[in-house]
Each structure stands twice: as C-alpha cells, then as structure tokens.
Image (spheres, rainbow, N blue to C red):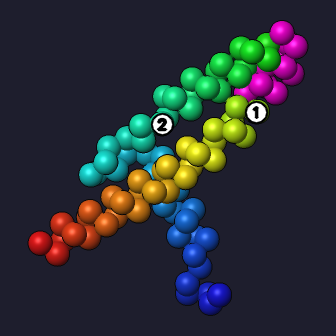
Amino acid sequence: MTAKHNPFKNIIKHTIRGCGYLPHCGHHPGTPILIMFILIGAIAGSNGGWKGALGGAGVMTAIFGPMYLYGAYETSVFDEKLTAREKIQ
C-alpha cells in the first residue's frame, strides 16, 4: 500500500459522506430506523437503570450500526458514479 493510494481512507470518506445528504440519493433512509432501534434497546435495558439503558443502546448500535454504515458507503459510491455519469453527458 503506497502513501498516495490508501483504500481505507477512501472507505471512511465514503461512509461519512453517505451518512449525510447526497445530491442524487438524498438523505440516508436508514437514519430514523437506526435511531428507533437504538431507542428501543435503551428502553428495553432501562430496567437496569442508566447502565442498562446505555448497555441496551450499545447492543443495538453494535448490531445495526455496521449495516447502517455499509448502506452509507454503498449509497455514497452509487452517488459518486451518478455524478461522474452526469459530468460525462
């Protein structure tokens, strides 16, 4: 891996970009769903007090967070391809 080409930096760039608004795709459709699942986990764990609520939210984040981030990455790559195609035409 050379200093000029770092694939991990590109993955992180696309993932962060995909979590926000994209010109061709709009906002990430999974954001409200992820927030809902995190809140459900916090409510489910709230019988154990604050530690339980944070633990429940953490478990739900660990389960659904990677799927959300993968979707953000894929959406950003798709949006970049659409932008490149639009510039060609």
Magenta stretch: give its range. 47-57
* Rendered position, 30 above or below 9: above
Q: In terms of secondary structure, what is the magenta stretch mainly?
A: helix
Question: Magenta stretch: residue 51 in it?
Answer: yes
* Rendered position, 10 above or below 14: below
Residue 16 in view (yes/no): no
User: Is tag 2's residue or tag 1's residue first in the polypeptide sequence?
Assistant: 2
* Rendered position, 2 above or below 86: below
Q: Amino acid at mark 1?
A: Gly
Q: Which residue is mark 1?
A: 58
The extreme top residue here reads 47
- Give percent across and percent down for residue 13: 51, 63
Q: Which residue is mark 2?
A: 30
For this view, does 36 lie left or right of residue 14? right
Count neighbours of disc 1 (C-alpha within 10 A) and say few if under 14, some if 14 to 19, many if 20 or more.
some
For this view, does 20 lie left or right of residue 16? left
- Give percent across and percent down for residue 45: 79, 17
Quadrant housing the C terminus? bottom left
Q: Quadrant of residue 40?
A: top right
The residue drawn where x is 63% and y is 42% is 65
The residue drawn where x is 18% and y is 66% is 86
Count neighbours of disc 2 (C-alpha within 10 A) and say few if under 14, some if 14 to 19, many if 20 or more.
some
